[in-house]
Image: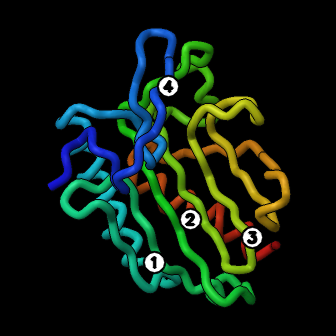
């Protein structure tokens, strides 16, 4: 089992100064966590993996690292959304107790009552990617947003979204619906 504060892929990441103290940033975008927070994140992500396995467009889903998930990945059939790309994937991260930057507050959580940070991001082999993120981002007002780009060299387009769900599994299904609707129109 990996310790809660260990990097998932063994790489070092620079500390980030939050204004209060310095925190080691993890590859999943989170921070060095207490064992309780890491266990809570693992339980949430394990539950989300089980939900992903029920989605008709998901051919397989897995968490990493084994035994203490920091993120989920899934293989997606893009044809389920009318897409012509050869392959697609989904990446999910969830931070149940995020560190909010000093310039931000929970008031920046427009359009949702969630206090967790998350990313649910879809990527195609064609280079197209999009996702719903709840995290501080200087390019969009409020922390909850949808982002999309047609190629890795393009800039993201950002849009506001709203979520009614307040539990992780509800957020996952609501977010997958937002992404599916966008894929079918793109």
Q: Circle 3 — which element?
A: loop
Label 1 close to label 4 by CB (< 8 Å):
no
Q: Does 140 sit above or below residue 21? A: below
Residue 124 image offset from top left, x and y in percent: 67, 76
The extreme top residue here reads 20
Secondary structure, mark 1, is loop
Badge 1 crowding class, 10 Å Cα cut-off, few under 14, some 14 to 19, many 20 or more, is: few
Q: Position of residue 106 (x, y in %)?
A: 53, 21
Lower position in the chain sequence, tag 1 or tag 4: 4
157 relative to 83 in the view: left or right: right
| C-alpha span from label 4 to label 2 | 31 Å
Residue occupying the point 69% across, 61% down: 130
- Residue linked to disc 3: 128
Determine crowd level at label 4: few under 14, some 14-19, many 20+ residues with C-alpha closer than 10 A.
few
Task: Tell me if residue 149 comes above or below residue 98 in the rendering.
Answer: below
Q: Nearer the viewer, mark 3 or mark 2?
A: 3
Q: Are marks 2 and 1 in contact (CB under 8 Å)?
A: yes
**First in residue order: circle 3 vs circle 4:** 4
Q: Is residue 111 above or below residue 154?
A: above
CA separation, marks 3 and 2?
Answer: 16 Å
Which of the two residues, 167 or 143, is positioned nearer the viewer here? Answer: 143
Question: Which of the 4 image quarters holds residue 66?
Answer: bottom left
| Mark pair 1, 3: CA separation | 21 Å
Q: Secondary structure at mark 4?
A: strand
Query: In this figure, which residue is indicated by the disc labeled 4?
Result: 16
């Amino acid at each position: 089992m990996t310790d809660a504060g260990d990097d998932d892929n063994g790489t070092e990441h620079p500390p980030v100064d939050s204004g209060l103290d310095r925190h080691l940033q993890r590859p999943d975008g989170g921070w060095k966590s207490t064992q309780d927070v890491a266990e809570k994140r693992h339980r949430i992500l394990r539950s989300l993996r089980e939900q992903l396995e029920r989605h008709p467009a998901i051919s397989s889903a897995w968490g990493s690292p084994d035994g203490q998930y920091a993120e989920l990945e899934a293989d997606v059939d893009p044809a389920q959304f009318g897409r012509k790309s050869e392959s697609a994937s989904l990446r999910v991260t969830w931070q149940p107790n995020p560190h909010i930057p000093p310039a931000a507050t929970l008031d920046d959580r427009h359009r949702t009552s969630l206090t967790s940070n998350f990313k649910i991001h879809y990527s195609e082999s064609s280079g197209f990617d999009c996702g719903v993120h709840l995290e501080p981002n200087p390019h969009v007002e409020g922390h909850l947003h949808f982002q999309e780009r047609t190629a890795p060299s393009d800039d993201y387009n950002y849009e506001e979204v709203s979520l009614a769900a307040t539990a992780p599994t509800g957020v996952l299904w609501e977010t997958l619906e937002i992404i599916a609707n966008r894929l079918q129109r793109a």
